Image: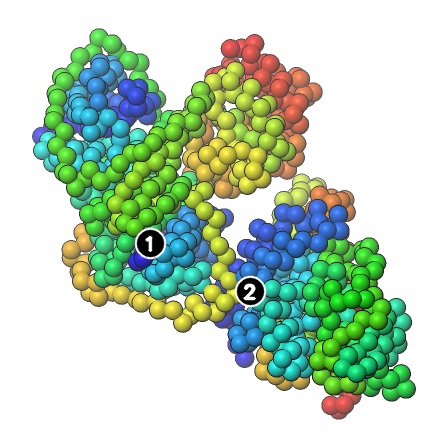
Amino acid sequence: MAKGIWIIVEQSKLEIRKVSLELLSQGRIIADKTGEPLVAVILGKDVTELSQKVAAYGADKVILVDDDKLAEYTTGAYTSVLNKLIRKEEPQAVLLGNTAVGKDLAPRLAHRLAVGLASDCTSMEIDEESFLTFMRPIYGGKAFAHVALNARPVMATIRPNIFPLAAPDDSRKAEVVNEAAVIDPADLNVIIKEIVIAASERPELIEANIIISGGRGMKGPENYSILEECADVIGAAVGASRAAVDAGWIEQKFQVGQTGKTVSPTLYIACGISGAIQHLAGMGSSKVIIAINKDPEANIFNLADYSIVGDLFEIVPLLTLEFKKLV
Amino acid sequence: MNIVVYLKQTFDTEAKIALNSSGKIDSAGVNLVINPYDEYAIEEALKLKEKFGGEVTLVSIGNERVQEALRTALAMGCDQAILVNDPGLDNPDEWVKAEVLAKAVSTISYDIILGGRIAVDDGSSQVAVRLADALNIPSVTSILKLEVEENKATVTREIDGGTEIVEISLPAVLTAQKGLNIPRYPSMMGIMKAKKKELKVMSLADIGISIAELPGKMNTLDYSLPSSRKAGIKIAGEVADATRELARILREEAKVI
Amino acid sequence: MNFELTEDHVMMRKMVRDFAETECGPGAEERDENEEFSMEIWKKCCELGLAGITFPEEFGGVGADYLSYAITIEELSRVDASVGVTVSAHSSLCANPIYMFGNEEQKQKYLIPLATGEKMGAFGLTESMAGSDASGTRTTAVREGDEYVINGSKIFITNGYYADTYVITAQMDKEKGNRGIAAFILEKGMPGFTFGKKEKKMGIRSSATYELVFENVRIPAENLLGKEGQGFKIAMQTLDYGRIGIASQALGIAQGAYEQALKYSKERSQFGKTLSQMEVIQFKLADMAIQIEAARLLVYQACHYATAHKPVSKLAAMAKVFASETANAVATQAVQVLGGYGYTRDYPVERMMRDAKITEIYEGTSEIQRLVVAASILKEY
């Protein structure tokens, strides 16, 4: 019986996160192959206007839960609402992006539903028995596990920037259903005091298409401006290796690697980064890797698709100029 | 204050990963450590103990080798440890682990439960949050700063693109993000004293649950190693020429700019 | 005979190794270049309980065995031999004689703060005329009422200037030669006790090495360590145990240099293969590994005897001479394996080679060690 593939759409200040659109795009493909309806679920405040966008990316149905208590994401309220909705509607699968919200919400919801959860998946496939099976990286991406879940709904969080975006079709229409937010009072257990969003126009690292990163070869905090200039020409995010973070040259939130962020951009430019195995764990799934390093023996060259052996202080500014000509 | 730390023993992040003859991850000769993120949890627990008094109890699931990790945490200053070791628990999934931990933790008093935000082996980032749901208490993930006053906690946590400050009542489960603190080294004295501290090994029966009540929810069908990337191209020539060529390749061939 | 380390020893090795790599590693080259002693690192060592490993808890120590101590010095020295000798000199050469020969008041007053690391210690035996030959001691001590008056100077004193507590030797009766020497406990700041030359050294450049100067330094009679005339014996017994510390330091230097060579040989390619694939280099690495393994067993055996309060003189001398010669051979070969790069400051092996040399000299030269061994074996036979 067709129960639906649910995409829990993440929105912030009424902007839909790119990973949710990626999931709708991929979800559409699966919906077409399995005959299951694709359902977008949006929680928040004043979210009605978002239904058209999710329809454009492939949703057959949109479930809106519009409530003051859902204006900002909290674990308890969102878990409570989704738990009740899912138990009522019994979808086949529930998918979320592996974002800060996804990582926080999905495990709690999965346990509330007494189901398994495949986290941080990099691919999914239709399966006769388990509806969907997933591939997920383990040991920092040094291996992959192919997993299947036996309970319903099948739940997974998907890594951002893995599935391509479909071309949106603004003429698509979806059935819109409004559901009341049913929240267990015990789940209203957190008070948000303050949210501080770092003012940065550069893309979020985990979602960025292009990242330019600097490591020990940067030699100092002031030199990151070279990377920032380049990043701003091509719309990239700036990252760093652990060596640079430990040296105090750049904040930890920019660290890419096993104990930093895991990224999968289309293009990763590694400047003055040796390519230690822990760094590779964080960016090894990048589609194209460029390495710029003075040391011809640097391990990063074993991974890079294209590289230049040379001084990044000469090369990066020149590259910035070349990019300016192209953009 | 009764502080509980959920600890996992993982491979060292430097470990080379290989598959054994049965296609599973080969653990032969691998160096095992305390999950690095759990060290932040242990340190925060010890700081709470220093401030409020009380005890820090470690809880873990696994075989005898996990005792090494627990002894190290005891050497850092934790007071006792519980290890749930049962032959029935063979590669338990996150749902099973959380249910087992909930039972184990329910044998003691707890005011606050701390864990690392993610384990560097499976990278699932689920068990601690599931544990909170099983115990019906709040969970806060990825914490960067913790302030406890009586039975309330004010927590700064990491969110995408920034931070958030929230207030919750205890007991609760909190997961530690890098940057929360700098974990201490176990001192010489701590190491000497660790072997005298209680490390209780409990079976499923000891914590009041049977394997029949713990059906797995997720199966691993197979493991694989990533395909190695093809060798890349080193662009030779004068800096200006090479750089121009790189930009061209990125635009015209790789089509990423 | 159990060759396995206990769980405790494994934990200690890991802790000190992590500490050394994180805290001592990063600035080691810079401190070496600037000949800069780090009080900060010393304080961190004390916080971890490294200052009084072998002393009983009642005297502020950890109550651990000699193997724990050896592992500590080895792991510190594997990263920075200067840190290794700072801890070793403090513990073996200053705190230990007070532990072995001090009376209860002296242990309460001096040993406890040394064992906890609240105070730092040093040992003043060597003089310009008294290196291997202690009978050349020219520093004098004269009893005057309920005081002793010390005059003279000491050179090459590790931890000098920074240490608070000093165990020194002085001649009270030249006619008696070695039997006229007495040992005393001095404190930094005592009037007349000043510091002279800071030595510029080939290696262990961030270990503080200073001259001590005594001009009519008046010390209370209670600061006599042991009995008058017992000073030479105190010094010799102190050095017996101290040799285990230096042997461990040498072992650590050898291990550190060897690992650098091993790692480099796998990364560096010439003639279409890595150095590690060349038999010539493989033999060098194998020889390093063999010597280090043998040195380690000698050191650990000496520790076993020391912990069991068995006579340790011969074994400690064997361990020291073998480990120090191993350190020099291994460190030199490590530079060789790293070739041109090994000769530059970009890699730590040149520092390790410079650091290794002193281990064949201080706390009894290799020549003296051989005399000690010879005396022992000839007595046995």
Q: Nearer the viewer, residue A254 or B231?
A: A254
- Against C301, is A61 above or below? above
Q: In the rendered image, which quarter contains the N terminus of chain C?
A: bottom right
Q: Residue at x 43, y 67 (%)?
A: B194
Read off the residue under disc 1.
B6
Res. C49 mark: 2
User: Toward the viewer: C342 or A77?
Assistant: A77
**3D distance between C-alphas at marks 1 and 2:** 28 Å
Residue count near mark 1 (Cα–Cα under 10 Å), binned few <14, some 14–19, many ≥20: many
Q: Are the residues at dot 1 and dot 2 in contact (C-beta closer than 8 Å)?
A: no
Quadrant of the image for the C terminus of chain C? bottom right
Q: What residue do we see at 77% from left, 70% from top? A: C124
Q: Amino acid at mark 1?
A: Tyr
For the question of whether residue B118 can be seen, the reply is no
Chain at tag 2:
C
Q: Secondary structure at mark 2?
A: loop
Percent across and percent down for residue B227 are: 44, 37
In the picture, measured across the screen, residue A175 lies left or right of residue A26, that is left
Task: Identify the image quadrant of residue C323.
Answer: bottom right
Residue B191 numbered mark, or none: none
The residue lying at 79 percent from left, 83 percent from top is: C145
Residue C79's place in the image compared with A12, above or below, is below
As rendered, which of C174 and B63 lies closer to the eye? C174
Left or right of A218 in this view: C138? right
Determine the image quadrant of residue B111.
bottom left
Say whether residue A270 is visible. Answer: yes
Which of the two marks, 1 or 2, is nearer to us in this view?
Answer: 2
Is residue A13 left or right of B29 when viewed as pictured? left
Residue A165 x %, y %? 33, 19
Of residues A86 and B2, the one nearer the viewer is B2
Residue shown at the point (82%, 76%) measured from the top left: C149
